[in-house]
């Protein structure tokens, strides 16, 4: 077992927000290539007032976690998929790709440099990792920047739902999340900026989040501002929406694999229509932060759809999916090959 002296933090009450740690990784792109990169203790970013990220939102990011497993090891969950998704996002925004192997090395370095901030096993807390790329050189005309910066910082976070995951209520939004040939399939910062007004509006109306229908027909379920959907039918089939404008969630892909290979459930990725929501027994949101957020109710312009499997608590199938995936992440259940990257 690895013994690591931990920071003096109240892990049970740390919350889910930014907490400065000791080191972060920085690499700069100039003259057509990335430099070797360094670890630095400086959390501040100094850029030109006309930097591409400030003028034209040229930035993309990832979110992932480091865990202390049941045997005391520190691991990261499927970081190769984060590296690939960041590359896909960078290409879409005309930014240079940060190489996958260097991405993985940067993650290793940041976690190792901040081991005392990786919460102990059993606290429910984790070390959140945020890799991102942004245009750092000045631009005035609308065009890609010439220089970029890749950074990774870490922040310990508590459980996304303190006290357990209670079913949430969503509203069907009147706003569009992503155009059919837009940037919905990549993790661009601009996607989240445009969702802020919609989420504040939803909160003001008493809802936890928005369900965004497809922008073309507004008849199909896509996703929320920050998570993918999954549904469970009355005969326990796990269904997720299929769309070219949905962000390919690593958690969703992992849950679908777990459903089929670990729990023996039938799975399907297909168009999911608003008109059929009442036919499902369970509904959930999935993503890095909470893994699974149960949905108890969706309100579609006055029409309430209540999910019997999760109106008061996480549904039976959702709970099995959650327990199995988190069991894999924390080392209690054997992981598929390549899913777990051990740091120490």
Image (cartoon, grey):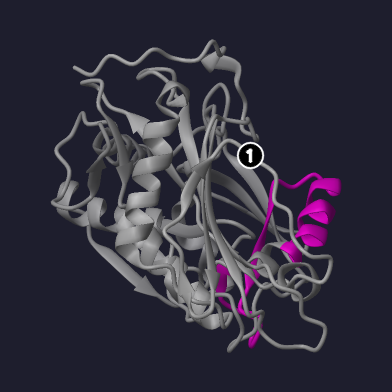
Label 1 Cα crowd, 10 Å radius (few <14 / some 14-19 / many 20+): few
Residue placed at 25% from the left, 20% from the top? 72
Q: Is residue 277 magenta?
A: no
Q: Is residue 215 magenta?
A: yes
Q: Is residue 320 left or right of residue 216?
A: left
Residue 238 visible? The answer is no
Residue placed at 82% from the left, 71% from the top? 50
Query: In the depicted view, which residue is nearer to us: 138 or 155?
Result: 138
Image quadrant of residue 108?
A: top left
Q: Is residue 287 left or right of residue 3?
A: right
Query: Residue 54, position in %: x, y?
Result: 78, 67
The range drawn in magenta is 193-222
Say which residue label 1 marks.
42
Secondary structure beneath label 1: loop
Query: Residue 336, position in %: x, y?
Result: 15, 49
Query: From what the image shows, is residue 198 above or below residue 153?
Result: below
Query: Residue 67, position in %: x, y?
Result: 36, 32
Query: Residue 177, position in %: x, y?
Result: 67, 72
């Amino acid at each position: 077992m690895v013994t690591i002296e931990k920071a003096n933090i109240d892990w049970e009450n740390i919350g889910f927000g930014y907490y400065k740690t000791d080191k972060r990784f920085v690499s700069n792109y100039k003259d057509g290539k990335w430099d070797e990169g360094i670890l630095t203790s400086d959390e501040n970013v100094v850029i030109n007032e006309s930097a591409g990220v400030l003028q034209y939102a040229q930035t993309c990011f990832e979110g992932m976690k480091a865990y202390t497993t049941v045997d005391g090891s520190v691991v990261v969950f499927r970081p190769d998929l984060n590296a690939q998704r960041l590359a896909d996002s960078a290409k879409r925004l005309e930014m240079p790709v940060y190489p996958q192997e260097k991405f993985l090395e940067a993650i290793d370095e940041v976690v190792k440099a901040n081991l005392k901030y990786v919460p102990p096993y059993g606290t429910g807390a984790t070390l959140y990792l945020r890799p991102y790329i942004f245009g750092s050189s000045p631009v005035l005309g609308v065009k890609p920047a010439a220089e970029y910066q890749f950074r990774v910082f870490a922040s310990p976070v508590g459980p996304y739902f303190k006290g357990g995951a209670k079913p949430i209520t969503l509203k069907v939004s009147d706003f569009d999340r992503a155009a059919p040939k837009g940037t919905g399939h990549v993790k661009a910062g601009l996607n989240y900026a445009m969702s802020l007004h919609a989420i504040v509006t939803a909160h003001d109306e008493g809802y936890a989040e928005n369900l965004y229908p497809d922008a073309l027909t507004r008849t199909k379920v896509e996703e929320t501002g920050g998570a993918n959907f999954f549904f469970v039918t009355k005969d326990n089939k796990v269904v997720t929406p299929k769309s070219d404008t949905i962000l390919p969630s690593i958690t969703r892909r992992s849950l679908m694999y777990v459903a089929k290979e670990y729990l023996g459930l039938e799975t399907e990725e297909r168009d999911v229509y608003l008109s059929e929501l009442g036919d499902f027994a369970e509904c959930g949101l999935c993503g890095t932060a909470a893994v699974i957020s149960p949905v108890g109710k969706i309100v579609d312009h006055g029409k309430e759809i209540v999910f019997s499997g999760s109106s008061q608590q996480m549904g039976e199938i959702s709970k099995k999916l959650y327990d199995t995936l988190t069991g894999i992440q924390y080392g209690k259940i054997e992981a598929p090959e390549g899913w777990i990257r051990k740091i120490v």
